[in-house]
Amino acid sequence: MAPPRPIRLRITRPDDWHLHLRDGAALATSVPHSARCFRRAIVMPNLQPPVTTVAAAAAYRGRILAAAPAGSGFEPLMTLYLTDELPPAEIDRAAAAPWLAAVKYYPAGTTTNSESGVTAIEETYPTLERMQQLGVPLLMHGEVNRDEIDIFDREAVFIDEILAPLIKRFPELPVVLEHITTREAAEFVAGADVDAKIGATITVHHLLYHRSHMLAGGIRPHLYCLPILKRDSHRAALRAAATSGNPRFFLGTDSAPHPVGDKESACGCAGIYTAPAALELYAEVFDEEQALDRLEAFASFHGADFYGMARNESRIELVRESWEVLECYAFGGETVIPVRAGETIRWKIAG
Ligand code: DOR
Ligand code: ZN
């Protein structure tokens, strides 16, 4: 007989190892939504212009801290945006800043604000070499964007063409394959050599949804993200990976707010806003998988261990209690539609 489902869950406070907070007036919404349950977050650098210097990251961090609710203890962990020109000397400065956690790789043209990204990985080898020497992690948006590669295949092709050769060339470089969406990615990460320094974040939307949710019965632009949702068998593989207890897999929401008009458009942009309900939705998934006892390690231990940071000491409590997500939130002078807008969520943060 299955054990009774718990109705309360007390876990170590989690961290979000992949987050988009945006900038300016948007921070007033985005920062409190994440700070409500996450103590730390890896903040992505794809602003306009991108965050390519430690000085720019320091200034951005200051703006985020100014938007954090008093007493929240929210700690933004900043990232640098890798370009063909990012000099190794900037990596020395990055390694000296304790709040600067990693460098983000976007292949040019793959996603939101990736125009300044890497055009050819070889261009960045001297910088990657320095990162490897200093132990600065490389966070990878794992897609190729060649026209002839179907959008649903772009992650799997990336693994073969870019990732596998890269980790052979830089075996000591810590690498995170961000927001994995396919069985191939889950298998690649789980199957890498025991001493490989590789991890992967898994978003809650890729655990909840598959491509038919986005495309059957009408196009739902608020479920459009990159890498794009795949077929259901991939979602199943991601659920298995997230709930496996394998320390290479950890929580990263990729919560990515956009003004409603940019999403509901003839050419809508990619990004799903999950921050207002992220931890609660992960709890829903782990509950469905009868794996609530593994949520804490996935959400609060594996990421910190990968980055060599201390695990959080404070705790947070979840209760199995339904609540309704708002239809929209203010977002600078505009509005943003969250995932599950106006719908019910079955887990709630207590208190
Ligand atoms: O869906 C996405 N949105 N994927 C990304 O890689 C970027 C993000 C964003 O910044 O909006
Ligand atoms: Zn992202």
Image (cartoon, helix red, strand yellow):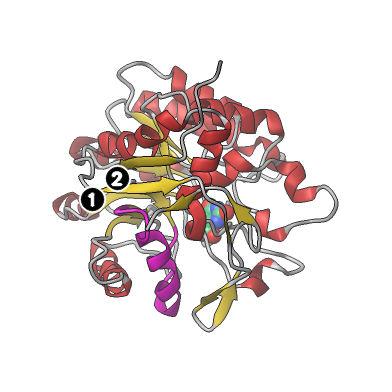
Q: Nearer the viewer, residue 94 or 328?
A: 328
Instruction: Please state, as top left, top right, bottom left or bottom right, where the N terminus lies in the image.
Output: top right
The residue sitting at 30% across, 53% down in the picture is 40
Whether residue 255 can be seen here: no
Which callout, 1 or 2, points to the residue nearer the camera?
Answer: 1
Q: Which residues are magenta?
A: 20-40
Q: Which quadrant holds residue 131? A: top left
Mark 1–mark 2 distance (CA, rounded to whole Å): 7 Å
The residue sitting at 58% across, 39% down in the picture is 207
Left or right of residue 225: residue 199? left
The residue sitting at 66% across, 43% down in the picture is 209
In the image, what residue type sits under mark 1? Ile
Instruction: Please state, as top left, top right, bottom left or bottom right, where the C terminus lies in the image.
Output: bottom left
Q: Nearer the viewer, residue 60 or 280?
A: 280
Q: Which quadrant holds residue 289? A: top right
Whether residue 173 can be seen here: yes
Q: How many marks?
A: 2
Q: Is residue 39 magenta?
A: yes
User: Where is 249 relative to 271, above or below?
Assistant: above
Q: Is residue 257 magenta?
A: no
User: Where is 47 relative to 100, above or below?
Assistant: below
